[in-house]
Amino acid sequence: MNKVVASADAAISDIKDGAVIMLGGFGLCGIPENCIAALVKKGIKQLTCISNNAGVDDFGIGLMLKQKQVKKMIASYVGENAEFERQLLSGELEVELIPQGTLATRCMAAGYGLPAIYTPAGVGTEVADGKEVRKFNGKEYLLEYAFEADYAIVKAWKGDTAGNLIYKETARNFNPMMATAGKVTIAEVEELVPAGELDPNGIHTPGIYVHRIFQGQQYEKRIEQRTIRKKA
């Protein structure tokens, strides 16, 4: 199977209005910048986006929010985006805030083929409203369902033409589990090499999970918050 596509535009060409999309990354680290730019360019609407965070106003998923492409945002942290805040408070955007560990585990459950998981996170809080609670060994747990995503879009440091992926440092936080969880997984990589060139012992996502792969261009690698001190 030839998994290599020419560009981000080709990789996301069949994503339509109303799709449910997982987007990898942690903060602004390891986000699929090229695919996000292609989604903005394509202009599709009514998307449900599952991501650790919502980017910032002029970068990452923030670009999609600015174009009013996102109907619902499912995330664990959204504190760096003024446009997100405006859309939330005005009722323009549906938002589901999830504890970060629960978000990761619901992705993982989808990759494992599990329909749901039980977690203690959120018991006794608003997170538990309307959810089934069960006791195990005297402790309460919430029932949380695995995500059902049409697409998982991830970004890796290196990949090969068979779809095997290696992530670098913080980019390993959500990309690997999301890569296993989409009905279609799209990977953009900083460096694309021939199959067999990567050390099998260093591969984080086996190619069996990846449907499309391409080498990205011009990664900006922004810092979400920069704190500096004045010279003494």
Image: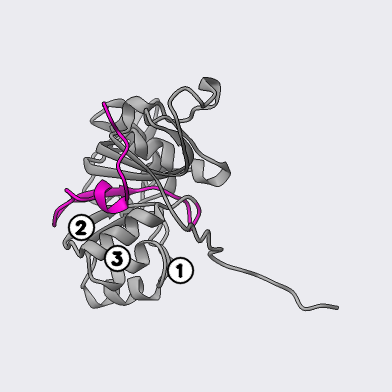
Q: Is residue 4 visible?
A: yes
Task: Identify which amino acid the numbered label 1 is placed on.
Answer: Glu
Give whichever of discs 2 and 3 has the lower sequence position: 2
Q: Residues within 10 Å of mark 3 (few under 14, many from 20)?
A: many
Give whichever of discs 3 and 1 has the lower sequence position: 3
Position of residue 66 measured from the top left corner of the image (x, y, whole percent): 30, 73
Q: Which residue is the extreme one toward the left?
A: 17
According to the picture, the residue beneath numbered tag 2 turns out to be 47
According to the picture, the residue beneath numbered tag 3 turns out to be 64
**Closer-to-camera residue (140/117):** 117
Task: Identify which amino acid the numbered label 2 is placed on.
Answer: Leu
**Closer-to-camera residue (82/44):** 44
Task: Identify which amino acid the numbered label 3 is placed on.
Answer: Met
Instruction: Look at the picture and state if 64 lies above or below 135.
Output: below
Quarter of the figure that contains the N terminus: top left
44 left or right of 107? Answer: left
According to the picture, the residue beneath numbered tag 1 turns out to be 80
**Mark 2 vs 3: CB contact within 8 A:** yes
Residue 230, image quadrant:
bottom right
137 left or right of 12? Answer: right
Q: Which residues are magenta?
A: 1-29
